[in-house]
Image (spheres, rainbow, N blue to C red):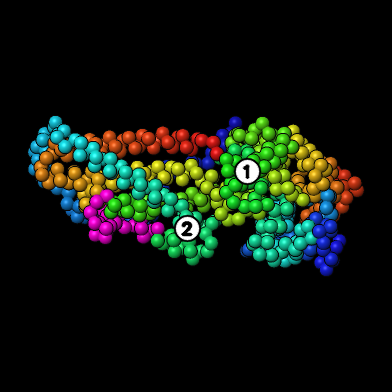
Amino acid sequence: MTESIRPAPPSRFEPPSPVSAVLFAAFLAFFTWSLAGAGISISELIEGLPNMAQIGSEMVPPATDRFSPMLDSVLVTFQMALVGSVIGILLSLPLAVLASRNHTPHPLIRSAVRGFVSFVRTVPDLAWALFFVASVGLGPFAGTLTLIVDTIGFCARFFAEAMEEVDSGPPEAMAAIGAGPIDIIACATLPMAMPSLVNTSLFALEKAVRSSVVLGLVGAGGIGAELATSMEMFRYDQSATIVLMIFVLVMAVESLSSHARAKLIGGRG
Amino acid sequence: MAGSNANLNPAGPALRVDKLAKRFDGAAAPVWSDVSFDVPAGQSVAIIGGNGTGKSTLLRCCLRLIEPNAGQVHLHGETLTGKPAGHLRKMRSNVGFVFQKHNLVPRLSVLSNVLHGGMARSRGPRHWHHALASREDREYAMHCLEQVSLAHLAERRADHLSGGQSQRVAVARALMQKPRTIFADEPVASLDPQAGEEVMETFAKLALDHGLTLVFVSHHLDHALHYADRVLGLRDGRLDLDAPTASENLESLRSMYD
């Protein structure tokens, strides 16, 4: 019996096109140049190792002499994060409706809102913090305002995308009943987008907690100010306590948020 | 077939479609054109035709969920085409629309979904969720669920129902509107034969009990013959069949698919 000729399988790897090869070479060259630009220096790293060991040894044992005021600052940090993210989330909802393709009253309004949200998101939170410290003075209020703006930049975009992604069937059913635009959003779009909205909101809270720690470094209230002071005073044992407190706070918020996520997303409507 | 200048009044046909045409943007040919028919109040009409003949589009155009390009639609004696959004919403409220995919809001309870039908009469938060609804509306919603034999599932989430149960909840939502007419777009297409029969029986019984006009799209020719008084057939971009079911049989209807 003659064996039929089998078609040859395709080659395992496609050779890169000349354009891809040139682009890859250009990327490698730029990356090598960037290593110098990023100040990577093995000698400085080796010289710095004893200092790192020195600071590390001074961090142990962590100090407890300012435990109570530090705890107060941690609480303020969390309060800033909570209030900032909740207000930011609430303000993001109407912005997301205006920025979503399926609910915006006019494409121009959608473009304007998306532009505003992109601008808010592009400016780093530390820049917003400096702006608000200069505007309303040092303290947690400046930090909270920063977190509100930061949350809007994050949530409004993802909320709008979540609203655009919902199945168009139930909103069409509402329109067929004679429901108005607000009824359609409240009855169909929001309940259907809820898992995504809850997820994004909880990520926003986690993000706000981490940001609020850094905001204190520029005088916007919270535990960051304590951390900056202790580092400037060379009280690394106090810094260690603050870092541990931040670690516990972030872990607690992340753990609570995953628990809440599971509960809220699985719940009955 | 009635002309476009006929004197319309609420006692006239439930639905009058006059020289309706639809062409989608970028399409070479219209889906259909020059489609005209009347549906007297209380009549049950099946729309049949092959895939892509525009049956669902026709039903949606009759409620302006899709805008027709030409022609007029009159619902319960009022002209639907050309009306502003507010008036259009008011007119739509008289028609319960049951979709192939049922289109319930998946994360809400069965009761909340049925209560949404109440938006046909008034709007606002009291129709958004069963926790906010008035006692009268909750009771009426339960009555609607009872009519489709699903009152015992009022608290269940809509995405935890079977296909047949979901479709019956969609029928209950349509009843909550207190409609004069029901449009159903392939209501049994996603159901097994038994669930499909149950849903069609529910439609037939409700239409009879409440004196409703029923217009449904179906690929099930036996359903068209059994549950409709009249069959409309779309083929080659036009209304190719308009006949009482009594004068048709399975063979004659199958010819619409040739």
Image-based side of B252 in relation to B102, left or right:
right
Q: Amino acid at mark 2?
A: Ala
Q: Which residues are magenta?
A: A117-140
For the stretch drawn in magenta, the main secondary structure is: helix
Q: Which quarter of the picture shows residue B16?
A: bottom right
Q: A216 or A211, which is in the foreground? A: A216
Disc 1 packing (10 Å; few <14; some 14–19; many ≥20)? few
Which residue lies at the image location 24% right of the left edge and 59% below the top edge?
A134
Residue A228, position as x, y percentages in the image? 17, 46
- Say which chain tag 1 marks: B
Disc 2 packing (10 Å; few <14; some 14–19; many ≥20)? many
In this rendering, which labeled residue sits more in front, label 2 or label 1? 1
Q: Amino acid at mark 1?
A: Ser
Which residue lies at the image location 61% right of the left edge and 47% below the top edge?
B127
Residue A137 belongs to the span the image colors magenta: yes
Query: Which residue extends farthest bottom?
Result: B5
Q: Which residue matches tag 1?
A: B134
Is residue B30 visible from the viewing direction of this image? Answer: no
- Say which chain tag 2 marks: A
Residue B210, position as x, y percentages in the image? 80, 44
Q: Which residue matches tag 2?
A: A99
Secondary structure at numbered mark 2:
helix
Which residue lies at the image location 63% right of the left edge and 38% below the top edge?
B110
Image-based side of A112 in relation to A236, left or right:
right
Query: Which residue extends farthest front?
Result: B135
Residue A58 belongs to the span the image colors magenta: no
Q: Quadrant of the N terminus of chain B?
A: bottom right
Q: Is residue A130 above or below residue B152?
A: below
